[in-house]
Image (cartoon, rainbow, N blue to C red):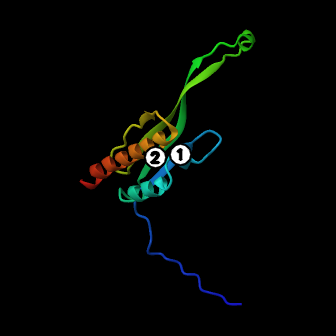
Amino acid sequence: MRTEAINIDRTNTNFNAKLTIIGGPPLSKKPQKLLPKKALQRLEEKANAIGTDKDTIIVGLCNSYVSEPEPNLFLNMLGVPTYRIKEKRTKVTLHHCFSGKSIDEPTEKFICGSTQQQKISAYKTIWKYLDSLQEKFTAK
């Protein structure tokens, strides 16, 4: 049996902003399901170019539904309200918390369209937000 030494690479420390993505579709705790493949990795790399290790960029992703009342005589007679889902949207909430600098109010955006269009638009929205943060905090 042969044993090999464990190499610990201490040169790859992360001194950049942390990207935290919370939320996701119902019944799934994975917000990656609301983004295209490999998008999360690209967004984390982009966030690492901004700020310090004490800075945090928070992205909230979830499904949002637009519903309208739909009559159901039996259930309504029992006092149970009934609704029909008209539209499924993706809700993107963006917020950053940089130490020693201004803290912004969370920004919300609702994205409509097909599932694939919602994924791509959510990714582009987050990317543009990271671009604006990079311009704002690396220029100073």
In this orientation, which residue lies closer to the viewer: 116 or 84?
116
| Amino acid at the residue labelled 2 | Ile
Question: Mark 1 highlights which residue?
Answer: 22
The spot of residue 25 in percent (x, y) is: 58, 40
- Residue drawn at x 42%, y 35% is 109
Image position of 4 with respect to 47: above or below = below
Q: Residue furthest left?
A: 139
Quarter of the picture containing the N terminus is bottom right
Residue 12 falls in image quadrant: bottom left
Question: Mark 2 highlights which residue?
Answer: 58
Q: In the shown orientation, is residue 136 left or right of residue 95? A: left
The spot of residue 32 in percent (x, y) is: 54, 49
Image position of 49 with respect to 22: above or below = below
Image position of 6 with respect to 110: above or below = below
> How far is disc 1 from disc 2 in space, using C-alphas?
8 Å
Q: Secondary structure at mark 2?
A: strand
- Residue drawn at x 66%, y 88% is 3
**Dot placed on the residue nearer the N-terminal end, 1 or 2:** 1
The answer to whether the residue labelled 1 contacts the one labelled 2, judged by CB atoms less than 8 Å apart, is yes
In this orientation, which residue lies closer to the viewer: 19 or 88?
88
Image position of 50 with respect to 72: above or below = below
The spot of residue 108 in percent (x, y) is: 43, 35
- Label 1 Cα crowd, 10 Å radius (few <14 / some 14-19 / many 20+): some
- Label 2 Cα crowd, 10 Å radius (few <14 / some 14-19 / many 20+): some
| Amino acid at the residue labelled 1 | Ile
Q: Secondary structure at mark 1?
A: strand
- Residue drawn at x 43%, y 54% is 43
